[in-house]
């Protein structure tokens, strides 16, 4: 009721209903005007309810993660999950899941040394999209490099020379490190004899008599160092 030609915004209308409006004029000394009715109501779309919860691990050492959430009360929901790389504000996002399940598939190949952030919303026919539900804190990826698939060197040598070889790791951009221990299978005082990208050492020459043990590990940027791959038995060097 007033002299303006429009109402203020009318808030808090219930979704799923139509609201109809009419207007008339009152003026001193005049009978009220007839109502002017807009026969088309205003249909208020309900807003979908977001999931009740969202969860993912705070850290990952495998380069993979999955996200799960609690069911919405909205019927016929489609869940949409977005990912933000190293940015909790979600300024740049990538959709990583859209479907009806309550978790994503495993999301592989995340880069080590970074945090990934996730959020989920609900879409449903006849409903406005729900607000995003965001898990505070991302998942920090600190993957551990995978050790070589195997390692081999001869069990004996009568020349004082040998070489060590190993199977490739599945970790990208690896550097292999080989250590040697003389007459000590506990590697209490190891010596590095190789560091590089090849799958075998150069010939290791000039070994004096004794038993030599070797182990190999993998380094890669953005990954925690792999565990050592060790052979149980050493190489017995006995010069002729």
Image (tube, helix red, strand yellow):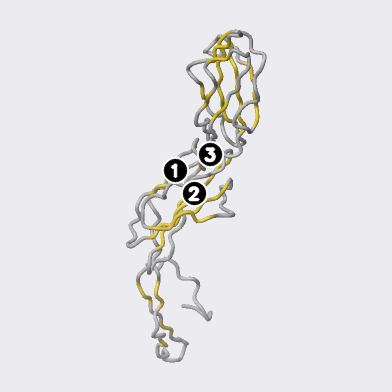
The label number, if any, that marks residue 223 in the structure image: none
The label number, if any, that marks residue 140 in the structure image: 3
Q: Earlier in the sequence, mark 3 or mark 2?
A: 2
| Label 2 Cα neighbours within 10 Å, binned few <14 / some 14-19 / many ≥20 | many
On screen, residue 229 above or below 40:
above
The image quadrant that residue 42 belongs to is bottom left
Where in the figure is residue 79, as x and y percent of width and height? 41, 57
Q: Which residue is under mark 2?
A: 118
Q: Earlier in the sequence, mark 1 or mark 2?
A: 1
In the image, taking residue 236 as reference, residue 36 lies left or right, namely left
On screen, residue 4 above or below 194:
below
The image quadrant that residue 208 belongs to is top right
What is the distance, in whole Å, between disc 3 and disc 2 at their CAs?
Answer: 12 Å
Q: Which residue sits at x=53%, y=36%?
A: 143
The image quadrant that residue 177 belongs to is top right
Where in the figure is residue 25, as x and y percent of width and height? 45, 86
**Contact between labelled residues 2 and 1, with CB atoms less than 8 Å apart:** yes
| Element assignment for label 3 | strand
| Label 3 Cα neighbours within 10 Å, binned few <14 / some 14-19 / many ≥20 | many
For the C terminus, the image quarter is: top right
Task: Give the camera-side residue of 81 and 89.
Answer: 81
What is the distance, in whole Å, between disc 1 and disc 3 at their CAs?
Answer: 11 Å
Where in the figure is residue 236, as x and y percent of width and height? 54, 12
Q: Which residue is under mark 1?
A: 56
């Amino acid at each position: 009721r007033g002299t303006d030609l429009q109402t203020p915004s009318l808030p808090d209308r219930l979704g799923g209903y139509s609201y109809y409006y009419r207007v008339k004029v009152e003026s001193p000394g005049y009978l009220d005007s007839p109502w002017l009715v807009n026969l088309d109501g205003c249909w208020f779309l309900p807003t979908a309810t977001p999931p009740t919860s969202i969860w993912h691990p705070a850290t990952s050492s495998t380069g993979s993660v999955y996200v799960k959430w609690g069911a919405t009360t909205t019927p016929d929901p489609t869940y949409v999950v977005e990912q933000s790389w190293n940015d909790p504000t979600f300024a740049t996002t990538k959709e990583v899941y859209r479907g009806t399940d309550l978790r994503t598939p495993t999301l592989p190949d995340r880069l080590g040394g970074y945090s990934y952030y996730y959020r989920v919303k609900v879409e449903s026919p006849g409903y406005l999209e729900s607000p995003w539900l965001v898990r505070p804190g991302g998942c920090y990826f600190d993957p551990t490099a995978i050790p070589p698939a195997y390692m081999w060197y001869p069990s004996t040598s009568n020349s004082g020379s040998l070489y060590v070889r190993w199977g490739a790791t599945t970790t990208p951009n690896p550097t292999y490190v080989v250590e040697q221990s003389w007459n000590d299978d506990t590697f209490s005082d190891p010596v590095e004899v190789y560091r590089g990208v090849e799958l075998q050492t150069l010939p290791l020459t000039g070994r004096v008599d004794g038993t030599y043990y070797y182990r190999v590990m993998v380094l890669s940027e953005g990954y925690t160092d792999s565990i050592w791959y060790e052979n149980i038995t050493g190489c017995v060097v006995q010069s002729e």
